[in-house]
Amino acid sequence: MSLKANNPNKKTWLTVPDNSDFPIQNIPFGVFLTRNDIITIGTRIGDTAIDLGALHQLGYFSGIPLTEDIFLQDTLNDFISDGKKTWRLVRNRISEIFDIHSTGLQHNEEHKKIVLFAIDEIEMQLPVLIGDYTDFYSSKEHATNVGTMFRDPENALMPNWLHLPVGYHGRSSTIVPSGTAVRRPMGQTLPKGAEKPLFGPSRLVDFELEMAFITTDANAMGEPIDINEAEDYIFGMVIFNDWSARDIQKWEYVPLGPFLAKSFASSISPWIVTLDALEPFRVESPKQDPEPFPYLKQSGKHSFDIHLEVDLTPEGGSPTTVTRSNFKYMYWTMAQQLAHHTINGCKVNSGDMMGSGTLSGPTPDSYGSMLELAWQGTKPIALQNGEERKFVHDGDTVTMKGYCEKNGIRIGFGDLSTKLLPALKA
Amino acid sequence: MSLKANNPNKKTWLTVPDNSDFPIQNIPFGVFLTRNDIITIGTRIGDTAIDLGALHQLGYFSGIPLTEDIFLQDTLNDFISDGKKTWRLVRNRISEIFDIHSTGLQHNEEHKKIVLFAIDEIEMQLPVLIGDYTDFYSSKEHATNVGTMFRDPENALMPNWLHLPVGYHGRSSTIVPSGTAVRRPMGQTLPKGAEKPLFGPSRLVDFELEMAFITTDANAMGEPIDINEAEDYIFGMVIFNDWSARDIQKWEYVPLGPFLAKSFASSISPWIVTLDALEPFRVESPKQDPEPFPYLKQSGKHSFDIHLEVDLTPEGGSPTTVTRSNFKYMYWTMAQQLAHHTINGCKVNSGDMMGSGTLSGPTPDSYGSMLELAWQGTKPIALQNGEERKFVHDGDTVTMKGYCEKNGIRIGFGDLSTKLLPALKA
């Protein structure tokens, strides 16, 4: 089926500000609370939010096989479950409805009042009920940096790293959308040189610049996903901040991995940008050596050129961009991650989320965490207001941005912005 | 509120075979498919399954604040969400309805036809939609055995182990009820002495004898659960087989913990035995030294005397009991696990599941996994039929049993029985 919604020449009758992440070529999916206190599934063009539940009720999706209530839900799981063919039909139809040459909604004032909302009138929700969330560790630069700091610069990568996309299971219940403040966690830590652990607020709260993909129902339990089909099961992507308490992590993570150092909060951008919308921005991923096992082998372009940046804004201050990175640096592709995740028969469901791992680039100004940017506190980052940061302070807002740009078309994710609150008890 | 359903003198008008796990003092909760192909929530007394959805429709729960469809669901999550007070009211009422002195249902043949099913007429389902699943590592004997085998007998426990209940996030999507066969996973392993990994079926598939508890909605994100209230948020317990592929685990688990070595399958017994039913079997947990931090400190009896055993049955053969252990050996209590899990503000929801970790006892015949029982393959276990086992073979059925017994009352969990199928490709 054609990806005609990607046509770069298409214009919309809605207003789209310059440099918007949401031209008519994007058409992401999300869930929002309207001014009438109704939760609905929607999309966004420019600064206009579009109620897909209302559009469907008004008949604009006629001819597409959709259940009546598919958009009148508080998560996208069922729609995602309908599969790639349906996502494309819906996205193409939305593209037609808002095409500048369209008749219909453009000239129906009554319908427009029901369907359209200014973006500041709505409140974005978590777009999916995340059944299982997995975090990978697929940036070679990040794994090398961490290995250099904590283990041995000569053997920074663990022996398994180049053979498989290392990953671990994470906590779904504390994944929150942009705009939800998160609290500095309490926990046990072992200060350097101490013999006994301490209990108190984490002193080393960090962000991790990641992206994550959302899957559809992919396989029966016991049956792996073929790497050549894996992308068909990816609905879309979000920006992901994998909040981390470095001092808690260091004390707790041996031998079973990160636990409370991560599960206090993880943040995602609320609009899921479809893999279809990202199609024009495909690029090759880094060359892999050694050659992966056949179940992980693929050729062609399976990464995406997504510019990423992180701003840090102290309370009452102005933002400082602390890093600029790119999704394309990721060593293992999303298809490889999904094929590996299921090679043991693990079942993947609609609404599962898989994080990339921290997306560090090759240069020190492209690292994806404060741990790396300030190199374990040895190279503090200067802020606009003259302050310095080794990690994130109470009151700081961390804002992550991501977008693709080519031939005058910019497809973006919108901001993922999260404020860090002080710990509950000091 | 009184736990009158626990009255040891109570008898039921239903038939209860000798040594049944399900006397009228148990009243567990589960979900089953009836002979009429309807999924309902139910309980079990002796070998009779009781349709709680039908009982409720017939008015037997009048006076208890329950929504009309609370039992007409395919998971227990909403009922569990109603909270401890409601669970007790319902359990006490069921106890009254089936009391030998009761009138009502006992003498209503028409209602009995609707409500009661022979246990072999129904098909047990997964009792809850498990949002998040966490596995702890709370048996000191197990952690010591593993540390002795893989690291250093002199320093078998990691430095953090005595200070906090070590745990990690697991995969919910592949948790299946008793009776669902599981498939030997494919994966990467690094054979001893090899320089490069191999790909193929795991050669070291193992069971782990665990128990798990199911929670209700407990806290808002950012707010810890007080250890003294933690037990109020535990609905009940199941037996849990945390299937493990030891060779896959060894290669993949550094530095982020077990992943595909566990996520191919985990099995639970289908009836959730309430904490209320286990109340008479409380015992003290092992003395803790060093003393835990205040947020983990508790006094009194917070463990339960639950006898556990594992039978291994080769294809076409008869069962050999390969271990006998007990839940009471667990060093960290469930309340401590829950308090620790939320000390960072992690949110716990209705239907979350938390595993104990392998429950090894102090003697070699009470270890909770083949890895320990056969001590890394050096002491193979003899089966009834003359065969030996170092790990689990294709076609073997692993059956776990658990029960409490005191003053002539036996409260059990029913069998957790799972057959291991050969890998998909050889």
Image: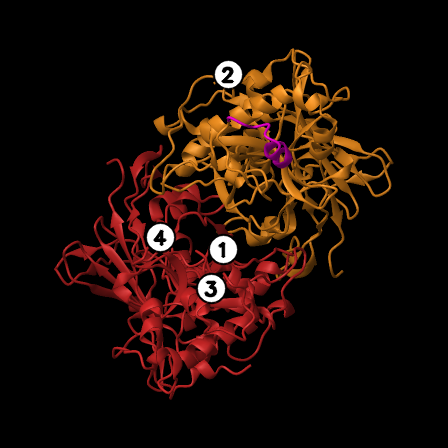
Chain colours: A orange, B red
- Say which chain tag 4 marks: B
Q: Nearer the viewer, mark 4 or mark 3?
A: 3
Give residue A344's position: percent from left, percent from top: 36, 40
Q: Nearer the viewer, mark 4 or mark 2?
A: 2
Q: Earlier in the sequence, mark 1 or mark 4?
A: 1
User: For mark 2, does the 10 Å Cα neighbourhood hold few (<14), some (14 to 19), or many (20 or more) residues?
Assistant: few
The residues bearing labels 3 and 1 have C-alpha atoms spaced at a distance of 10 Å
Q: Residue at x 73, y 56 (%)?
A: A423
The residues bearing labels 2 and 1 have C-alpha atoms spaced at a distance of 43 Å
Whether residue A282 is visible here, answered yes or no, is yes
Q: Are marks 4 and 3 in contact (CB under 8 Å)?
A: no
Tell me if residue A368 comes above or below residue B209 in the rendering.
above
Tell me if residue A220 comes above or below residue B72 in the rendering.
above
- Say which chain tag 3 marks: B
The numbered mark at residue B240 is none
The residues bearing labels 1 and 4 have C-alpha atoms spaced at a distance of 14 Å
Residue receiving disc 4:
B243
Which residues, given as a range, are shown in magenta? A52-63
Disc 2 marks a residue whose amino acid type is Ser
Q: Nearer the viewer, residue A395 or A252?
A: A395
- Say which chain tag 2 marks: A
Q: Nearer the viewer, mark 3 or mark 1?
A: 3
Residue receiving disc 2:
A2
The residues bearing labels 4 and 2 have C-alpha atoms spaced at a distance of 44 Å
Residue receiving disc 1:
B134
Q: Nearer the viewer, residue B62 or B354?
A: B62
